[in-house]
Amino acid sequence: MAEVVSEVVPGAGTETVGPGDAKQMNMIQAINSALDVMMGRDPDVVVMGEDVGFFGGVFRATAGLQAKYGKNRVFDTPITECGIIGVAVGMGAYGLRPVPEIQFADYIYPALDQLVSEAARLRYRSAGEFIAPMTVRSPFGGGIFGGQTHSQSPEGIFTHVSGIKTVIPSTPYDAKGLLIAAIEDNDPTLFFEPKRIYNGPFDGHYDRPAKSWAGHADAQVPEGYYRIPLGKARTVREGEALTILCYGTMVHVVASTVAEADIDAEIIDLRTLVPLDIEAIEASVRKTGRCLIVHEATRTGGFGAELSALVQERCFHHLEAPIERVTGFDTPYPHSLEWAYFPGPIRIREAMAKILKD
Amino acid sequence: MAERNGAGDRTAGDRAGRNLPPLSLYVPEPHFRPGDQADFSGFDIPAADAAPRPDETSAAGDMRDMAYGLVRVLDEGGNAVGAWNPNLPPETLLKMLRAMALTRAFDERMFRAQRQGKTSFYMKCTGEEAVAVAAAMALDRDDMCFPSYRQQGLLIARDWSIVDMMNQIYSNKADRMRGRQLPIMYSVREAGFFSISGNLTTQYPQAVGWAMASAARGDTRIAATWCGEGSTAEGDFHSACTFASVYRAPVILNVVNNQWAISSFSGFAGAEATTFAARAVGYGIAGLRIDGNDALAVYAATRWAADRARSNAGPTLIEHFTYRVEGHSTSDDPGQYRSADEGSHWPLGDPIARLKQHCIGLGIWDEERHAAMDAELASMVKDAAREAEKNGILGHGMHQPFETMFEDVFEEMPWHLKEQLQQAIDEKKAAGL
């Protein structure tokens, strides 16, 4: 990692600058490109997980990598998430830089002990003798009729744990730059991929035709190496009326709802939950005086609760209305009632109206 | 009335019309409880030279019997016999004996230190010294160990500083772990000793991962890991066995069957149904069941497994059949749950006494020299403890700067930890501290 490369942090709609030509990519292709770039640059990077090898992953994120880098660096694993993460901890201790995939975030729970008690604490408990420089990729979130075991958003479980970073991209451009930064990072990092927007942005209107990333400014992705630093939020839209804090799929649902409602909202895509870009949040809420938090995960004890507390602690005297949260309900993700559960445009619009009432 | 699942309230009347006997739940119970006379006369101990020694590269399927036998080298008279005799030179035997004796002396001293209030916790490995010491001597110095909490003998056999170990136990200012870990949860990268977790068997898949990385890199180093028989029930154990089998990882999976997991006897991990070495059979990996109180058997089996791993013939699971002579830790009283004389009646004897007898039989050792060594080691650990205590003991002042609590959570301290640190400093100041 000796090579010095400038960090490029474009906002939405800004032109991408980076080494190599930009190319139209969806989020899966961008993730695949990040893995390819990192495997090419660093022989310590290894990719492992269920179905990631010959087949290239159930979402195709690792397609072609085994053929290019060999089975010693890209390999299928037994179906034991505990084993996958435990093995990644050991490989990290050896000196490798593992990028395990957990096929769905809903399957991450068998690995919880290895993540929470091992990977997250290894640096601390050994006072830096051993570290766990792994990046765990995992598709998360609903909107694909996955039912209760293919739709969950468990990020709040991990943001509660000391020693783990949590990253969630919302565009192909960010997905690649953030994933590269996560892989280079020496701390264990969870990289949750919003699978509803793998193939295109989603405005929250499930009954409208699906959009692809084609033509989207943030789907122009440089083919080479670039990184987006962890802990830096992205202002998706500048505005004065209220601040909306969101990440992943909800960035697009929020942006579309704001445009439809013609409200001058400032939309902040957090990109990294831990470490959080508190400066961006504070600056925005101090400016607008109003704050809406939107996430798909369940409400109680969710990351929105932490955001709400932080905004209240730091911006209380600037607030002109109570902070509102639009989140998934505190129920399991229902299959047939998916769109009743999903925190979509209606709920976001109602919350904005409530915040802006007086 | 609360809703409830299932047929928990079915009565005998409900079952009456069906001509089936009532089911019964079996809950294991150890043979001996407090007050019982321990009697191991029914114990089947094969002769020391009974076990065959398969070639290191044998197919696992051709040596399944090894998982149900008992590899032994030292017979009742202290002679090294049979195909597994490692024929060690005198200096190796005496080094092994000394490391085992030092481990016991270290344990005695640290147990007493805990009782004297110098630290919060300690765990002895009395009766299990051979399991770690002989294994360490059979491995190469740069092979990587992923221990559980009762393999202090690995560090001692690798000549690691006992003062450094004591500093960790005292959580004092010289503790390299900065006082963060429970006593005995060492981490010694330099000695190929992975950071001990305290959560059980998490080290198993980690060892397999390390071994897989070594193999993927074309390295020559192998990994070894240890867990207790009780924690073979953990999912991590089975995940690790699956990975080890699938990728033929160069790893040695040790199960230290010391009969007791705190107060739960080995039956609660399945010992009444089969051996722990037999876990290997289902995974298609080599399984050896050995006399864990026989240092030469431990050495020979470990060397066999290491040679197997180094020749790309895959992993080995070794069940070390032994006995936990003391309590689980300083926090439990085994007199509350097991017969007091189990340890003295244990049919496989004491590992140090057996190796000592062997060395005396060879004419390379005698009782006088042994007594002199014990006295020397006792004085050595006493001196070491005194030196470590100069760096402080637990609970007497803050041995680590306050801010170190916030360090090493991440490589770089993020804003929220910096802020919490500052808040804590401000609070202390405000309180006049």
Image (cartoon, grey):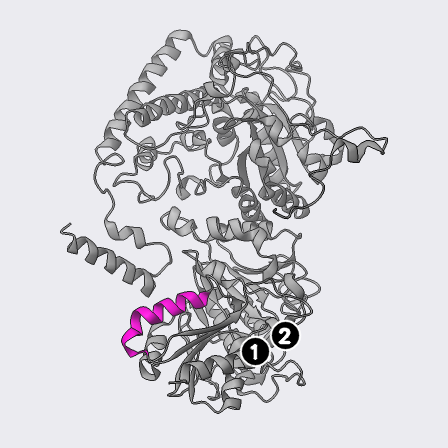
Task: Indicate the amino acid at tag 2.
Answer: Trp
Name of the residue lying farthest toward the front: B1
User: Residue A36: horizontal and vertical position, in percent?
Assistant: 57, 70
| Label 1 sits on residue | A344
Q: Seen in the image, is B373 located left or right of residue A155?
A: left
> Which residue is at the front of the view, B193 or B11?
B11
Residue A57 appears anywhere in the view: no
Look at the image and give the residue range highlighted in magenta.
A303-319
Give the residue drawn at x 61%, y 70%. Answer: A142
Q: Main secondary structure of the magenta part?
A: helix
Give the residue drawn at x 31%, y 24%. Answer: B115
User: Residue A245: horizontal and vertical position, in percent?
Assistant: 43, 76
- Residue A339: mark: 2
Task: Indicate the amino acid at tag 1.
Answer: Gly
Q: Are marks 1 and 2 in contact (CB under 8 Å)?
A: yes
- Is label 1 on the same chain as label 2? yes
> Which residue is at the front of the view, B418 or A49?
B418
User: Residue B369: horizontal and vertical position, in percent?
Assistant: 38, 11
Give the SS element for disc 2.
helix
Assess whether residue B246 is covered by the magenta stretch.
no
The quarter of the displayed image where residue B121 is located:
top left
- Residue B32: mark: none
> Which residue is at the front of the view, B156 or A256?
A256
> Which residue is at the front of the view, B210 or B337?
B337
The quarter of the displayed image where residue A146 is located:
bottom right
